[in-house]
Amino acid sequence: MAHPNPEKVKIGWKALLISVSLLAWPGFSLSQEPEPAAPAAGAEEEPSPPWKGSAALGYTQSGGNTNSTAINANAALSRDGELTDLGWQAGLLYGFTRYTDKNILSANNYFGLFRVDQFLTTSKRPYGFCQFQFQSDQFAGFWGKYMAEAGAGYNWWKSKKRSLKTEAGYAFIDWNYTEPSEDGRRWAPTNNSVARLRYWHQVLSWLALSEEAVYYLNLEDTREYQTESMSAAKIKLTDRIGFQSSLAVKYNNRPPLVEKKDAYGQTVHDADGNPVLERAKYTDYIWTNTLVLSFP
């Protein structure tokens, strides 16, 4: 697939990978917090940590000049062990806009994720991770994006009120395009390096902020890269119910081909009746506001 403008994509990816690798090295620490105290001799072991979960749901309906409906949902489940942390997450966004007597699909994406963090010591600072993820976004040009990652990370700030983790590793990504690429492919497996930052902060008893930023670089063609960012603020309303506002931004400097749409969401056709293809937008963003139910 031809690059849109190779001259504009000159990035210091080698320097970035080296710096992230340094951040993941256990001997280099920004933390000024003391290590947690070891349990006293003879003390009873605490029971296995319980599973924690949450479910979020958002709904938007507009009428008048614009008739549209959208729903977004998200569910998460996690378990923090002495040395092993597990996490599952899944979500979807689906919506349509009504033009005269037709409902035109305007959003159709969903994802699922499973992750394991294996810490090397009970201090839970250096760790290895593996993550498996599936994404689908019709309007971004792919029915499936299958991802498998593995690497190493380090937890710089470890307390009940904040956490800062950096990671570096390898990611295998296999794309299943909605339309054939410029070289006729429907599938495009790639080998990538990955760098990630994960931040969480309980600012106040009722307010928590989080950020996750990820960078993927195609090792077979270093002009091709992707970035993803998820920022969120969660407000505690009751012990179990909260309100969350989040912004997800994704950038792909070599997006897939998609069908061109007119101002009414209809596919544009050429003189022979074939759909006109164009490159998907480089940047996607989704701003969602949801009520969150936490358990137990």
Image: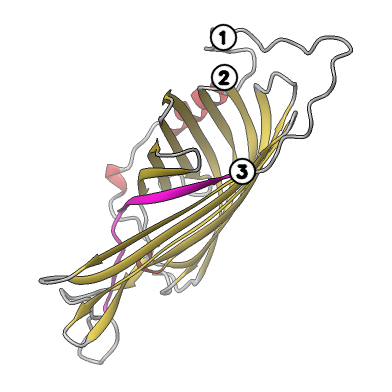
Mark 2: amino acid: Ser
Disc 2 crowd rating (10 Å Cα; few below 14, some 14-19, many 20+) is few
**Left or right side of 294 for 247:** left
- Looking at the image, which residue sits at the far right? 42
Mark 1: amino acid: Glu
Q: Which residue is mark 1?
A: 33
| Mark 1 residue element | loop
Q: Residue at x 45, y 74 (%)?
A: 184
Find the magenta span and give its range.
276-296
Q: Residue at x 42, y 47 (%)?
A: 226
Q: Mark 1 to mark 2: distance in Å?
A: 8 Å
The answer to the question of whether label 3 and label 2 lie on touching residues, with beta carbons closer than 8 A, is no
Disc 1 crowd rating (10 Å Cα; few below 14, some 14-19, many 20+) is few
Q: Which residue is mark 3?
A: 296
Residue 159: give its label: 2
Mark 3: amino acid: Pro
Q: Identify the image's colour scheme: rainbow, by chain, secondary structure or one colour.
A: secondary structure
